[in-house]
Image: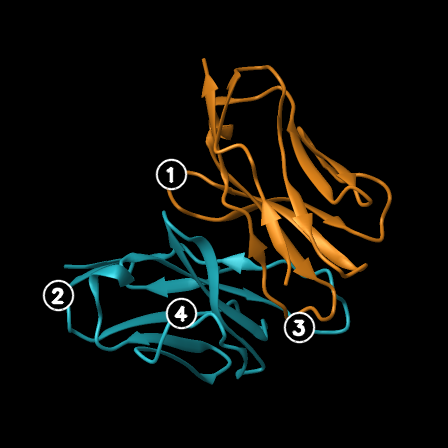
Chain colours: A cyan, B orange
Amino acid sequence: DAGVIQSPRHEVTEMGQEVTLRCKPISGHNSLFWYRQTMMRGLELLIYFNNNVPIDDSGMPEDRFSAKMPNASFSTLKIQPSEPRDSAVYFCASSPLGVTRTYEQYFGPGTRLTVT
Amino acid sequence: AQTVTQSQPEMSVQEAETVTLSCTYDTSESDYYLFWYKQPPSRQMILVIRQEAYKQQNATENRFSVNFQKAAKSFSLKISDSQLGDAAMYFCAYRSARSSGDKLTFGTGTRLAVRP
């Protein structure tokens, strides 16, 4: 079975450019999470969706960041305009959602973003 | 808000020996889950072990076991018979049991080196 798929794996862009990160969750998983990992702040949640609906976006740094989940099999995280401080590894994770509460989150390989 | 603390930025162990990584957390909830994730140089986040707070028995997965002390809010990971492949960053994480679709809160991580 395919795991969580993220693209691109690496992205290098110039300050001010728009960046779009993509995620395909595991089929059948109804929860999707976007995390960011930096040396300074560690791993932090940006936003998560249940059944395609955003539940908690309090971790989104500012209006430059936006995330969408138009259907159960696809999500995007967009940064516009990008800044050097956005350089980080961005992880997407998914998990099932249901009456059983012990589901784990499965992580994608991450996208390493470098903004110059 | 929940917080997770890993007080050991780096640890080192001799191959075949045992090492314990520490984790403490703060929460006002009584029902929750705790996890240890491993992140090797490949960046992939790999679930090592999971503990349900309502279970008194400590979780075990082969060479990995935990010491869960709910009253002390402590959740340490013991790695027995350490192997070179265990070298990685290890993250402790907390998740509320309010629903299966909820975020993980991570500690800052412990980098484990394994000496041959």
Q: Which residue is tagged 1?
A: B41
Q: Secondary structure beneath disc 4?
A: strand
Q: Which residue is tagged 3?
A: A97
Rendering coords of residue B42 (x, y %): 37, 42
**Between disc 2 and disc 4, whose residue precedes?**
2
Q: Quadrant of the N terminus of chain B?
A: bottom right
Q: Is residue A112 visible?
A: no
Q: Amino acid at mark 2?
A: Glu
Q: Is residue B7 visible?
A: yes
Q: Amino acid at mark 4?
A: Cys
**Between disc 4 and disc 3, whose residue precedes?**
4
Q: CB under 8 Å between callouts 4 and 3?
A: no
Of residue B30 and residue A14, the one placed in the foreground of this image is B30
Q: Secondary structure beneath disc 2?
A: loop
Rendering coords of residue A27 (x, y %): 54, 71
Q: Which residue is tagged 2?
A: A14
Same subunit: marks 2 and 1: no
Q: Amino acid at mark 3?
A: Leu
Q: Secondary structure beneath disc 3?
A: loop
**Between disc 2 and disc 3, whose residue precedes?**
2
Rendering coords of residue B30 (x, y %): 81, 59
Q: Which residue is tagged 4?
A: A23
Are there few (<14), some (14-19), or many (20+) residues within 10 Å of tag 1?
few
Residue in view at x 42 percent, y 76 percent: A75
Are there few (<14), some (14-19), or many (20+) residues within 10 Å of tag 2?
some
Residue in view at x 77 percent, y 73 percent: A99
Of residue A29 and residue B67, the one placed in the foreground of this image is B67
